[in-house]
Image (cartoon, rainbow, N blue to C red):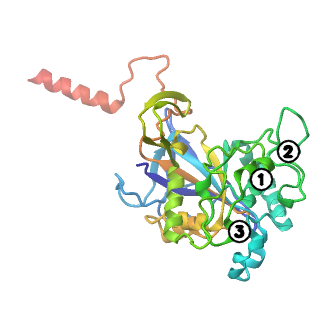
Amino acid sequence: MTTLTICPTGYYSPNYNKYNKLIPRAFPSSSSTYLIFNRSFESTALTSTSPLSLRCFSSPYPDMDGGVGPTLYPLHRCKTLHLVRHAQGIHNVDGDKNFKAYMTPEYFDAHLTQLGWKQVENLRKHVHETGLVKRIDLVIASPLLRTLQTAVGVFGGEGYEDRMDVVPLMVANAGNSGRAAISSLNCPPVIAVELCREHLGVHPCDKRRNISDYQFLFPAVDFSLVESDEDVWWKANVRETREEVAARGLKFMNCCYTVEFSTRGCMILLIGNHVKEQLVPATMEITILWLWTRKEKEIAIVTHSGFLFHTLTTFGNDCHPSVKTEICKHFANCELRSMVIVDRSMTGSDTSTTNYPGNIPSRLDLPSGVAHKKLEKEETSSND
């Protein structure tokens, strides 16, 4: 099983109007690059501008070094996740005042309010001013209208021009938004992933429409990972428990997709940049660790308040309480927080793009400690 570590590196919150650094500090050596995490709270203010990232996760495997002090991880075994809660939806306006309002049928698959679109514009301005949008390789969005609108509004391309060879990320007036179409050019790809949906069941605002409807509204968004056109996850009379939401969140963080084959045949797997052909028997379930076999290193995830809170609450149990609070406190509408997630297994065993082997041109290059031991051994042998 993949062992994950998560830690905050920065955030943007429209409620406090703070613009914080989002770049995790990498510490290069002559041959390898690492991230250093401070799991304690010593010499670290409760802001995202600290030069140390904060490593926080209770793992089933004990740390080799023990304790909660600074820990090193190879950079190529880390991914940066930029977590975003959707902007204000029509259900939030009344729901924030009266929780029972979330039961209103008119809020089915709630779309953004005009205030929500202003929040999207402000976050979009932020990710462009900080250069974050240029670093993000992939955007993952929950397949609901408000998250899709937020994702394409924040990370999509500039003004769309109608042309035959390029489809828009969002068509004009999608979801009665009154907004112009959004271009799919010069922006990261957007993929819909069902696992990061909001707390499922009972509330109509959390029920999605058919994927075929979304495909018309968001033509350039990739919905291929959503298995059913209709919403078979949402139940009118059954609400997910908090524990079930958290379990689904951890499954999302591990990004395991199980594919069932009912007939014998040949399957082509794309693992990172490598293509692998594999024969499958008559009935077989294959779990694909999707996130860690992708090449993208910086990923934005646009999702929901309840999903984020219950998922992130499972992290940070080996940290200072203030650090855990920083990780799992509730998100404001259109808030962005950046985290580094670490794979301590060999699941994402891709090669580093920054490490340099050294000794080029090559020569005899024994480290001083090794040379000293070799000399001691030679002297001992000559004395015998």
SS at mark 2 in the image: loop
- Residue drawn where x is 80% and y is 50% of the image: 217
Labels 2 & 1 near each other (Cβ < 8 A): no
Q: Residues within 10 Å of mark 2 (few under 14, many from 20)?
A: some
* Amino acid type of the residue that numbered disc 2 sits on in the rendered structure: Glu
Label 2 and label 3: CA atoms lie apart by 29 Å
* Nearest to viewer (mark 3 / mark 1): 3
* Amino acid type of the residue that numbered disc 3 sits on in the rendered structure: Cys
Give the number of marks: 3
Residue 354, position as x, y percentages in the image: 56, 33
Q: Is residue 350 left or right of residue 169?
A: left
Up/down of 186 relative to 60, above or below: above
Residue 34, position as x, y percentages in the image: 50, 43
* The C terminus sits in image quarter: top left
Q: Residues within 10 Å of mark 1 (few under 14, many from 20)?
A: many
Q: Is residue 285 left or right of residue 190?
A: left
Q: Residues within 10 Å of mark 3 (few under 14, many from 20)?
A: many
Residue 154, labelled with which disc? 1
Residue 263, position as x, y percentages in the image: 47, 35
SS at mark 3 in the image: helix
Residue 183, position as x, y percentages in the image: 83, 43
- Out of 309 and 135, give the one closest to the viewer: 309
Residue 205, labelled with which disc? 3
Q: Upstream in the sequence, badge 2 or badge 3?
A: 2
Label 2 and label 1: CA atoms lie apart by 10 Å
Please name the residue that numbered disc 2 is placed on.
158
In this rendering, does residue 286 appear at all? yes
* Amino acid type of the residue that numbered disc 1 sits on in the rendered structure: Val
